[in-house]
């Protein structure tokens, strides 16, 4: 259960905006509606929440000092602050106190009635689910998730005009609906249905109308639409425009860096990273240094990449992404011809962190396989990831296949060709190399063939050849075991849902 449930409820940045990195439900009924006008946050609590969304928790706490300590809005914003600090820092020393404070807030909210108290109770319970799973209490987290889902569904039914409930319920519906089929049994056991389409409808409703959490709704919807509709450039531009309007918002800077990195726009991502707001008022975001290390690795700035990942490891208190960081440190030292440092970093892959997230699993598998990486293929991969496609293709032309070339390298070469041609805007060449990868792979337990099937699905979807696209998405789901199965299966499932519309 650990891998999918962790992914379901957490993200590297996990503030309230990015909570639930993979979760939304059956149609929200409008049954017994209440005539009560839903209460909103006080102006001061709303300003405190806005400060938190800029990742300035200390400022948010100062604003709350003069608010009623037992008011539903105060309790909710206080919990969002504690929750953001816990999951961004990944500091296990904070866990017990955070969960205890959540229990106290939930007890106070049980004595209150209305849309905002009910909403706050469900939100805090969802925060608790994420915290419990992150720090190894999966069974408790599963029960908390069930409670949060049912409570939020009840809020949406009781107060159909209260749009914040649609925001959270929509997020949960989307991600539950996008999970691979082999996890559905557990969700059914918990009584948690999911639907990508219903989730998007609920989130869209929350994003279009004015309420306390509209800005948050817009950010979540943009992220999910990017996953669903593959309009990454539009999403990146939206984040950049918002960041320009709020130059003091570190969260928007983070989202801009992340989206530009995802789109292989290395220079733009680094510019956003270097232009981010800094200072003691901001919540430290160690993961930003980890992303910057990747970007510098793509550019061949190996010493600078090492420096950024070393800073990430110094500041970060969590156990996830450590194996990945040491793997990237290994790559920087190895490609920079510092074999002594490379050997030391490689040992740390096995000694540090937890093998839960896919990035860490890939790093651990590299260590366990003890199969040396191919320098040419590795450099081409990094160049492609960075958006340097002509350079990657030039690097790949120097690859020489021999009778002793390992199967992994034989499969990786056509796959790297396909990725470079695909991202370089040459779909015909990409299709040829993706198909070659699939044909050569058979049942080999590497991610090159399932990823090739996924990408062929996207290409044929773009060409409006829906039947062919559907067959490739289904093929991507058919591979039983590989390094990126969870994320590959989720993407394929979301794409199949889009084709069904």
Image (cartoon, rainbow, N blue to C red):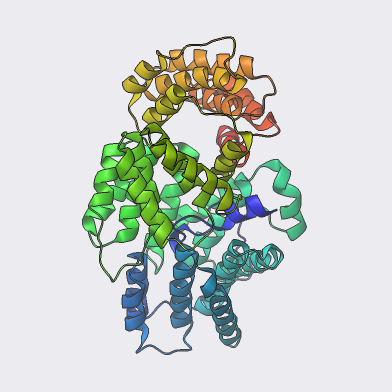
Query: x, y percentage for residue 359?
Result: 53, 44
Query: Which of these two is toward me, 498 or 418?
Result: 418
Dividing the picture into quadrants, the one containing residue 364 is top right
Q: How many marks?
A: 0
Based on the displayed image, in which of its 4 quarters is residue 452 positioned?
top right
Question: What x and y, as percent, mark residue 338?
Answer: 38, 36
Residue drawn at x 48%, y 66% is 164
- Would residue 234 be visible to someone looking at this image? no
Whether 321 is drawn above or below 315: the answer is above
Q: Is residue 345 above or below residue 253?
A: above
Residue 341, image quadrant:
top left
Q: Looking at the image, can residue 64 be seen?
A: yes
Q: Is residue 316 left or right of residue 365?
A: left
Q: Is residue 124 above or below residue 245?
A: below
Say whether residue 169 is left or right of residue 222.
right
Identify which residue is drawn at 39% across, 67% down.
211
Q: Residue at x 46, y 23 (%)?
A: 377
Instruction: Please state, as top left, top right, bottom left or bottom right, where the C terminus lies in the image.
Output: top right
Residue at 36 percent across and 55 percent down: it is: 311
Name the one closer to the observer, 50 or 396: 396
Most distant residue in the front direction: 340
Q: Is residue 428 left or right of residue 365?
A: left
Q: Position of residue 242 (x, y in %)?
A: 28, 54
Q: Position of residue 33 (x, y in %)?
A: 58, 71
Which residue is more in the foreground, 61 or 46? 61
Between 172 and 81, the one lying in front of the other is 81
């Amino acid at each position: 259960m650990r891998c999918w449930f962790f992914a379901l409820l957490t993200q590297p940045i996990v503030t309230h905006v990015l909570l639930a990195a993979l979760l939304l439900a059956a149609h929200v009924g409008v049954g017994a509606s209440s005539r009560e006008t839903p209460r909103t946050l006080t102006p001061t609590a709303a300003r405190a929440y806005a400060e938190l969304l800029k990742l300035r928790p200390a400022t948010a706490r100062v604003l709350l000092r003069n608010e009623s300590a037992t008011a539903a809005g105060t309790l909710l914003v206080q919990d969002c602050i504690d929750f953001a600090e816990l999951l961004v820092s990944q500091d296990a020393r904070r866990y017990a106190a955070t969960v205890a404070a959540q229990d106290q807030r939930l007890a106070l909210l049980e004595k209150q009635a209305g849309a905002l108290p009910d909403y706050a109770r469900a939100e805090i319970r969802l925060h608790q689910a994420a915290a419990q799973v992150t720090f190894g209490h999966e069974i408790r987290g599963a029960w908390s998730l069930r409670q949060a889902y049912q409570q939020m569904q009840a809020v949406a039914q009781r107060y159909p005009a209260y749009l914040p409930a649609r925001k959270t319920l929509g997020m949960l519906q989307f991600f539950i609906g996008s999970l691979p089929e082999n996890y559905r049994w557990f969700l059914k056991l918990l009584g948690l249905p999911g639907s990508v389409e219903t989730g998007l409808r609920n989130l869209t409703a929350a994003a279009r109308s004015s309420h306390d959490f509209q800005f948050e709704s817009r950010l979540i919807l943009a992220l999910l639409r990017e996953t669903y509709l593959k309009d990454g450039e539009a999403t990146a531009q939206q984040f950049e425009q918002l960041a320009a309007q709020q130059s003091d918002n570190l969260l928007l800077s983070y989202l801009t860096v992340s989206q530009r990195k995802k789109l292989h726009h290395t220079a733009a991502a680094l510019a956003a990273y270097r232009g981010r707001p800094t200072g003691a008022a901001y919540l430290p975001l160690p993961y930003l240094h980890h992303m910057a290390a990747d970007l510098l690795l793509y550019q061949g700035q190996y010493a600078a990449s090492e420096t950024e990942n070393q800073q990430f490891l110094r500041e970060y208190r969590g156990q996830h992404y450590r194996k990945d960081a040491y793997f990237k440190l290994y790559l920087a030292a190895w490609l920079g011809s510092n074999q002594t440092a490379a050997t030391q970093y490689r040992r740390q892959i096995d000694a540090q962190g937890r093998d839960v997230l896919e990035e860490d699993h890939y790093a651990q598998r590299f260590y366990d396989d003890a199969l040396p990486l191919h320098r040419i293929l590795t450099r081409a991969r990094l160049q492609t990831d960075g958006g340097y496609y002509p350079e990657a293709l030039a690097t790949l032309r120097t690859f020489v296949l021999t009778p002793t070339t390992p199967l992994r390298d034989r499969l990786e070469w056509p796959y790297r060709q396909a990725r470079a041609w695909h991202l370089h805007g040459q779909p015909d060449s990409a299709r040829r190399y993706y198909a070659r990868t699939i044909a050569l792979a058979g049942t080999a337990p590497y991610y090159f063939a399932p990823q090739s099937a996924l990408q062929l699905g996207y290409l044929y979807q773009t060409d409006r050849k829906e039947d062919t696209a559907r067959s490739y998405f289904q093929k991507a789901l058919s591979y039983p075991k590989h390094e990126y199965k969870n994320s590959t299966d989720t993407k394929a499932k979301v794409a199949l849902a889009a084709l069904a519309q």
